[in-house]
Amino acid sequence: MKKYFFNLVAMLLVLSVPAFAQKWADLSKEEQLMKLQNFIEDNHKYMKDTLALSEEQITDADNVNVCYLTTLDRINRYAKTDADKEKYAKSSTESRAKQLEAIMGTDKYNKFRKYVETKLKKAAATM
């Protein structure tokens, strides 16, 4: 499960920040893994300490992200056109957001989303 989650985070980083993605590709697999582990640990700490989410909520959020990654993989493999891939990926992304919002609650989800966006922007700025 961790392998899938690490892949999800890597994919989200690549999709979210193109400038960061170019630098990401230059990292060795070990360096990527270390960065992903730190990213996940920071996110879990934020969810637990700042948002006061339970371990079950954190695990459920992780599971949503793993399902999201596998869905994107299937879309990439089976959708015929780029337009179809984009359409299905948008739908999947909206569904993921709704699931995370249901797990965390609207307020906490919005705070977490802003937290991650800020982290990604800072990471892109330092690369």
Image (spheres, helix red, strand yellow):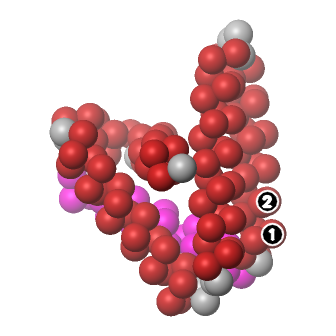
Position of 79 with respect to 42 (left or right) is: right
**Residue at image x 75%, y 71%?**
103
Q: Which residue is mark 1?
A: 102
**Residue at image x 50%, y 89%?**
49
Height in image: 3 above or below 105? above
Position of 37 with respect to 91 (left or right) is: left
Q: Main secondary structure of the magenta part?
A: helix
Q: Position of residue 4 (x, y in %)?
A: 51, 44
Could you tell me how far apart the alpha carbons at marks 1 and 2 are, in whole angstroms? 6 Å
Q: Amino acid under label 2?
A: Lys
Height in image: 37 above or below 14? below
Q: Do callouts 1 and 2 mark residues in contact (Cβ within 8 Å)?
A: yes
Q: Which residues are magenta?
A: 107-127
Residue 121 in view, yes or no: no
Position of 118 with respect to 107 (left or right) is: left
Q: How many marks?
A: 2
Residue 117 is inside the magenta segment: yes
Pick the residue in front: 49 or 4.
4
Residue furthest to the top in view is 80
Neighbour class for label 2 at 10 Å: few (<14), some, many (≥20)? some
Q: Secondary structure at mark 2?
A: helix
Q: Quadrant of residue 45?
A: bottom left
Q: Position of residue 60 (x, y in %)?
A: 68, 65
Residue 98's disc is 2
Residue furthest to the front in view is 1
Residue 62 in view, yes or no: yes
Q: Amino acid under label 1?
A: Ala
Height in image: 39 above or below 88? below
Q: Secondary structure at mark 1?
A: helix
Height in image: 6 above or below 41? above
Pick the residue in front: 16 or 95.
95
